[in-house]
Structures are given as C-alpha cells and as structure tokens.
Image (cartoon, rainbow, N blue to C red):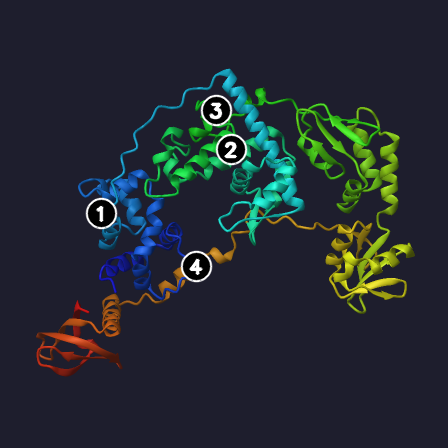
Amino acid sequence: MSTHARPLADWLAAASDDDLRRLFTARRVRPDAAWQDFFDAAEALLDPASLAKVLPALTAAEARALTDTTSGASAGALQERLTALALLRPDGTPYPPVTAVIAGRPSPEPVTDRPVPPRSSDAASAHAAERAFTTVAVLADLLLIARERPFALLTGGGVNAGEKRQLTEAGVPGELVDTLASIALQAGLAVSADRRLRSSRSAEEWLRSSAVDRWSVLARSFRDALPRGIRSADGGWIPPESWLGAHPWDQGWPERSEALHDAARLLGLIAEDGTEPEWAAALRSGDAAETDALARLLPAEVDRIFLQNDLTAIAPGPLEPALDVRLRTIAARESAAQASSYRFTAESVAHAFATGETEQSILDFLGTLSLTGIPQPLSYLIAQTAQRHGLVRVSTDEETGRTRIESTDGHLIDTMAVDQSLRPLALTAHVGSLTTRVGRDTVYWALTDARYPATLVGPDGTLLVRERHPAPASDAAHTDASDLSPLIARLRSHQGPDADAAWLDRELEAAVRTKSVLQVTVGMPDGSTRELLLEATGMGGGRLRGRDRAADVERTLPVSSIRAATIVAP
C-alpha cells in the first residue's frame, strides 16, 4: 500500500463534491469503481496505470510544468490545474508515484506564440466556401441514410469497410465517412448506441435548416469540442500550425491532430493553402460565427423543380433543405450537384405513404413545388400506389394477443402464406387471414421489406405510422450510468471523524496481507512509548499479532495502543 496515498486521501476528503466530480471525470473514473473510502480513491488515482491514462491529456504547458523541477510547477494556473488532477500536492510538488511515472519523459518544448494565419485570398475563400457547402450537403446525405438504416461501427468508433462501400454507392465519399461521422457526433446530430450510428432527433431540425444555419451548427460544435491543448484562452483555438505539439505525451495525438486539420478544412475553417477565410476569424477568437461573408459565396437555393414525363424531377439549383428532405421521402435522388435529379418509383411513393403522406398531400406538395405542373404518368403512379397502400392490414388480435394479417385480396393472403421469405414469421391460416406469434411491428416491417402493401392498424381501426429506427435524443448516450454522484456519496459515507485511526487500520491490514515487518510505536500505561520491530502475522478483534524480531516472541497488541506503524521491509 502506497504511503503517499494518505496526503491525497486527506485532500480528496476536504474537496467539494464539484471538485471531485471534475477530477473523476478528467481521470476517467468509472461510476461503478469499487472504492469504499477516500484511501481507496487515493491509491487508485496514484496507481501507475491510472497515471498513464491521464498524462496524454496534458497540454504542452502542463506537461512541461510537471517535469520542470525548478519553477514550472509553481506557476499559479498550471499548479491549480495539476493539483485538481491529483498530480501535484497543494505545495506544488508532484506525488512520488507521479515522479516515477514521468521519469525519462522528455520535457516538452514550450509552445511558442505563432502569428494569426493570414487572411485567405478571394480564390482561396471561394474554394473554402465550396468545400464547406459540399461538406454540409454530404453530411445531410449521411444523416438521411442513417435515419433509415443505422450503420455499424467498429470497436474504435470508425465505420466498417462494408458500410463505407454502401455509402460510397449512395454518393457519400468513403474516405470522408469517418470524419463526417465524427463531426455529426460532436454536433449531436448523430448518436452511437450498441455500436451503431443513427441520426438523432435534433438532426431532424438541422436537416430542414438553410445551408448557412447548418454550417453554423457544425462549426460551433467543432470549436466547442476541440481538445484543451488547442483551445485558446478566449474560447477559440490557437493557430493551426501549433496544433501538432499541443499534447506531447499522447502517442496518438499526431494522427488526431491531422484528423482535426482535415475536419477544419472540410468545414471551410482553414483554406487549402493554410490561410484563414473571413468567416473563420470570429470563431477562432471565441465569438459567434459571422456568416455573411460565407453566405455571399454559397450558391443560391431554389424552391421550385421541373417535373418530367419520365417520372423524374430536376431542381435547377440546390433545393431548399426542408423541401429537399420532404421530396426525398417521395422520390429517390439520383444525382447531387448544382442541379439535382430525383426519380419517382412505386417503392419511393409507397415509402411516402408509410411515413404518413396521403395521395392528396403528395399532390398538393408537388403542385406547389413544380414549375411544370404534375405530369399524367406521375399522377397515375401516385393514384395506383394509393390504391394498393393499406391493402394488407397488420393488427393485434385483442383476444389471443397474436398478430393478424388481413386483406381484401385473397390472392395476396395465399401468396404470403407460401412466401419463403416470410417463413421465419411462422404464419398460420385462420378464417381468411394469417396469424403469428411474432410481434406486430416486426411482421409489418417484414412484409414491407418483401414489398407487400402493408399498413399497421390500431385497436380502433385507425392507420398507424411507425418509424423503423426511431431517432434517439442527441444526449441518449449520456444516461444515469455516467453519474458520479453515487460514488461520491459512498466515499463520503465512509469518511469518519478519525482519519488517523482509519489510516492506521489500513496500514496494519496491508502489512498482515504482505507479511511485512513493521516499526511499531506502542503507548504504555504510564504514558511513555515503546518501539517494537514486529513481523505482522494476523489481525482481528481489535488486536495485531506478530513476532517481535528483537525478542523472538509472539506478541499481541491492542490496536488502540498503537500510536504509529511504518513498514520497514516486506
């Protein structure tokens, strides 16, 4: 047991709950840590494995202060930060286990102040604006895909190769997927749960915002999520040229720094030549985004389309996001450029009905959107699909609890009964319908995947609209499981008034476990003290048993009489 844990335990006991919460969060302490008291906490925080986890998070200035034995650790703000991380004692000296862990690590070079990046030229600004607009549009595509079909993540958080291939086929560049996913997670537009990435509820509003508003959300969240080492004192960021040396003890930092550079370039915060566009200056200084300069360089959005006889639609420019999102529930987008094209199919129109659209709502929407009216082939497709929609009704039988499939078309019932793709449902014929023990929603989506015109029906006969993958809140991952309050309360409950006696008990128990030799100071009845060299062998009933090395006899000492105990040797 470390003798250096006692001073830290005393500091922890005197700290406020908020200070403990910040410390445990920074040190990545799990809420279910098996600590019983502050002595356990101190020992764990000074464990070499725990220290090795916190050192990579130190900034260059903090790392230099920790290794500087002359003056670095005495700087006020740095000392407070390192003390709050349980790396320094209140007097500014490192705990011995910390000194042992950093021994041999080179002292980082001081991060010199670099000049503010030069302002971008008109050409560089135009290219950065185009890059930002493209990034926003492609990220919207990614979120729309994730809304319909959440995709799998690797253990490290990246998207697996198979998913990337499918996303590439859908128009999302595979080499940008991981960066875009990271940007979306930072902005709360996507959540990761059960190793799957899916759009969040806040993404629904973002998807319907203008390109400038979309960019503002992404740029602000990118800045707010930057690591401490590259954050400036005013809440912005230090010049990008200094990012590489920001966390010198993090072996993975060079790769992460490069990823942050890539994300900044994708968002148009850094031009390709390393200069700074006008709209990035305010964000870098910690102020709100100034979007006027960016908006002037973005292509104008349109609110009208051309509907054509071949069941396609052409937008003569970037379609307003809210209109684009709704149109893509009715038609599949075929190409994305300054002029996007969409195609209407029976499947795409059926998808619109499944999301709550009706024949009249689709016609009204397209009528207000189209510059060319609604072509007859498209009207016929919508009407035909509307007639088939709801032909198969899926409900729950209240008496049996089984799922019932009904249809006015007996041929459809017969077809479903022998459809091999529906075999896992174990469908059973029952009075002109089919029943199964499988849940109603599962049956509905199975029929939809098999391209049957299925509709969910409630107990009162009303049509129900269901999302296959309901969007979670952006903070769904932050549940009570990450609450440190129970841990802090448990530590407080074991915080007795006599810390010296509690610490002595721990020292004696540790000595017994390791069969250590103790230098024991025993209080005598006459008020004097006596020193004994004792090999600890057992403890119980408030008494310590051990062999007296000097007299070579067994002794049993009341713990209440022991004034001090120091481990001499194992």
> Residue 92's mark?
1
Task: Determine the CA span between mark 2 and mark 3.
Answer: 14 Å
Considering every residue shown, the one lying at the far top of the view is 122
Earlier in the chain: of badge 2 and badge 4, it is 4
Q: Nearer the viewer, mark 3 or mark 4?
A: 3
> Residue 219's mark?
2
Residue 123 image point, x, y percent = 52, 17
Task: Determine the CA span between mark 2 and mark 4.
Answer: 32 Å
Q: Secondary structure at mark 3?
A: loop
Horizontally, residue 196 falls left or right of residue 352, namely: left
Residue pointed to by mark 4: 31
Give the residue type that dot 4 points to: Pro
Give the residue type that dot 3 points to: Ala
Residues at marks 2 and 3 touching, judged by CB atoms closer than 8 Å? no
Above or below: residue 250 compared with residue 544: above
Mark 1 residue crowding within 10 angstroms, few (<14) / some (14–19) / many (20+): many
Quarter of image, res 117: top left
Give the residue type that dot 2 points to: Ala
Residue pointed to by mark 3: 271
Earlier in the chain: of badge 1 and badge 4, it is 4
Residue 373 image point, x, y percent = 84, 27
In this orientation, which residue lies closer to the viewer: 542 or 370? Answer: 370
